[in-house]
Image (tube, rainbow, N blue to C red):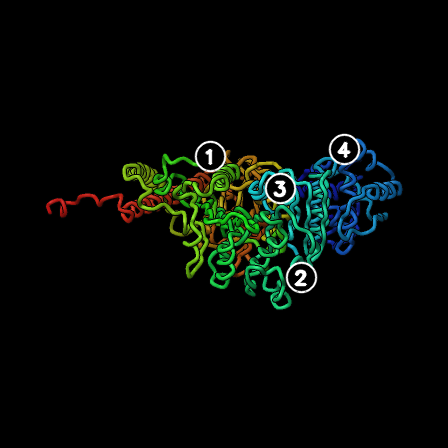
Amino acid sequence: MTAAEISRIAGVTRATVSNWRRRHDDFPAPSAGTETSPLYDLPAVQAWLRGRGHTSTASPTEELRTALRLLGPGSGVTARLFPLVAAASRRTPEELAELAALPDDQLTARAEKTAGELPVAVPEAEPFRYGPDDVSVLRALLGCVREAGAQAAVDVLAERELDEGAASGVYQTPEGLALLMARLLPASTSRVLDPACGSGTLLAAAARQGAQGLFGQDSLPVQGRRTAVRLLLAAPEAETAIRVGDSLRADAFPDITVDAVLCNPPFADRDWGHEELAYDPRWAYGLPPRFESELAWVQHALAHLEPGGHAVMLLPPALAFRSSGRRVRAELIRSGALRAVVSLPARAAYPLHIGLQIWVFQRPEPGGTDRTTVLFVDGEGEQRDGAAGTPSATDTATAGAGTRGGSRPRRSGSSSSAASSAPASAASFDWAGLTDRVLGQWAAFTTAPDTYADEPGVARAVPLVDLLDDVVDVTPARHVRATAADIDPDALARRVHDLHEQLAEQVAALAAASASGGWQPSGASAREWRTATVSDLARGGALTVLRAATPSTRGSKGPAAPTGEDRPVLTAQDISAANPPSAGAVDLHADATQSVAAGDVLVRAVAGGGDAAAMTRVADDRDAGALLGPHIHLLRPDPARLDPWFLAGFLGAEDNIASASTGSSLVHVTPGRLRVPLLPLEEQRRYGEAFRRVYELRAAVRRTADLAADTAATLTTGLTAGVLLPPDTPDNASA
């Protein structure tokens, strides 16, 4: 382990670790590495720390992650540890503590016996054999299960194995989305299949809804192991069967039909088997085009359903309108197999930059009732229309109507890869509100589809004949937009009046923020000062780099927040947009090892957008307690030596960012290379106050621009819909 890792588990600065090395002769000598970057033996360091009364401050998941890393790549131990996690989950905390305290030889023997006691089918798991080199990771694993829970241990093991393979960048389907998809199934659903099961999030959600038969397949062995153990933890009484392999080319369940399919399949996979599967009997609705692999997954799901069974799938929005898939879409509609399409806001799931869609299918029944309509729900409309934080023209149009219910293919359904480098939207995400909105419309539609009443701007049941045109576009926003007849002229006029008042107030606030305020020239020439790098300041104890997030830190990288924890997450987009923490811990699988505190300095790890001033921010009370999303460096200055706003202002300077960055299309910032002037604290505070005022000016500009855009959009809607008249002017008044 490195000196930085020692400082993290001991809860001290790196300068303190350096002092220990110099002052204590019994401090463990380096066991590997170089003179400038020494590496230390983890057990020896832990023993030394315990001898001096230092308890580890690292989280159990971080300790397990460190122990796995020290085994080195290619050890293969993670595959052998999955069964032990499953078995350990059935032991009490006291039993786990007793097991972890055994001598090394007894620990390995008991661990083998414990893992072998559990008759669980973990796909392609290695034999349960542990050796002396595994002792540290066994103790860390048992501690993680005892303190953080078995699921946290499973996620760390999967993360390690994915990092060593070619499938890095795998992300779970968000818990909120998985539960929404599972709740779209009938309450009587008993047997569920996920042919691209990933980490098992969707199958676990189905189990929470009462499903007792759970079948899954994934092309990655690690994901199969992960799902098998997850389902054992979530549904120990259920019948489960998890297999490894390519579901399209080598279906592990060719003779099984189920009540329902839940699936988040790979997107844009050009190597799904178009040629070799050209005459496959599953293509009852037409041969999927070469570049429409999603339509192959749709028909695979339908082929596994009992007549009348449902499939709920998460699919990319382009599938709704691409011309290459028009014939298959038309046949799905004509046969009555497509029941509903729900659009989701961006950031609902990876890739974050696009709004995905939920498609609901039902396998036609021989002699069943003809289905004449398809339900469309615009789940992203609320976020899109309310981008400025206030109701939009469409919201006003539907006021009073009421709302029912209040780069490579992604690898697997409950997990995906190739995510966007930054979220496209900073608006907060309300899973409960979205779920109520969608389920309310779905329940009303399925209860009485012939008498279903449309809700303008939210949901609409469209006759099949209206969809079967030359395009066969099933994009929800195209079908549920409010029409002129839906808009209340009086309500929209009041809305315009309110917007004008808010805009006038914001313009006044902007004018106040932009007042000159006594800015003076420094003299005949620019000031010069000595500077130090962030690395220098950290070594001197003036600040601590609590997390230096590399640009690859995403998704499963870093310890995830515990399942069910609903802590806000600060994203890189929040920093540039001056917004409070906008994401959820479950959504982004945020780093839970370090919370944000007021006074912390946050630096975006990826520069771009031509707005260097938006690279930094000082955390305030709104941010305190939030978790860190990806692509953020967190620095914590000593307030007795560094003013936070002074630090943030100079760190975010355009020249400073440029000199500390690498890359061209994506510019990665190395925080240790950023430089800061060496000034007395009192003078720092003067600069800090000035930088704070500049930050407030930027925030006021953004708020004004958002409000002006909302006002302009509302006026355009009213004029073009014929519900607003142009105001009288001197010229037309005389006419």
User: Which callout, 4 or 3, points at the residue further toward the start of the chain?
Assistant: 4
Mark 2 or mark 4, whichever is nearer to me: 2
User: Which callout, 1 or 2, points at the residue further toward the start of the chain?
Assistant: 2
Q: Find out whether the residues at labels 2 and 4 contact each other: C-beta distance under 8 Å.
A: no
Say what secondary structure mark 3 lies in: loop
Q: Camera-side residue: 103 or 201?
A: 201
Mark 2 vs mark 3, CA separation in Å: 27 Å
In the picture, the disc for residue 189 is 3
**477 relative position to 250: left or right:** left
Mark 3 vs mark 1, CA separation in Å: 25 Å
Say what secondary structure mark 4 lies in: loop
Q: Camera-side residue: 438 or 556?
A: 438
In the picture, the disc for residue 31 is none
Which amino acid type is marked by label 1? Answer: Gly
x and y, in percent, of residue 199 in the image: 66, 48
Mark 2 or mark 3, whichever is nearer to me: 3
Say what secondary structure mark 2 lies in: loop
Which amino acid type is marked by label 2? Answer: Arg
Which amino acid type is marked by label 3? Answer: Thr
From the image, tell me which residue sits under label 2.
Answer: 249
Residue drawn at (55%, 50%) of the image? 367
Hey, which quadrant is residue 117 in on the image?
A: top right
User: Which callout, 2 or 3, points at the residue further toward the start of the chain?
Assistant: 3
Mark 4 or mark 3, whichever is nearer to me: 3
**634 relative position to 44: left or right:** left
**339 relative position to 137: left or right:** left
Is residue 416 shown to the viewer in this render? yes
Residue drawn at (50%, 46%) of the image? 616
In the picture, the disc for residue 53 is 4
Mark 4 or mark 1, whichever is nearer to me: 1
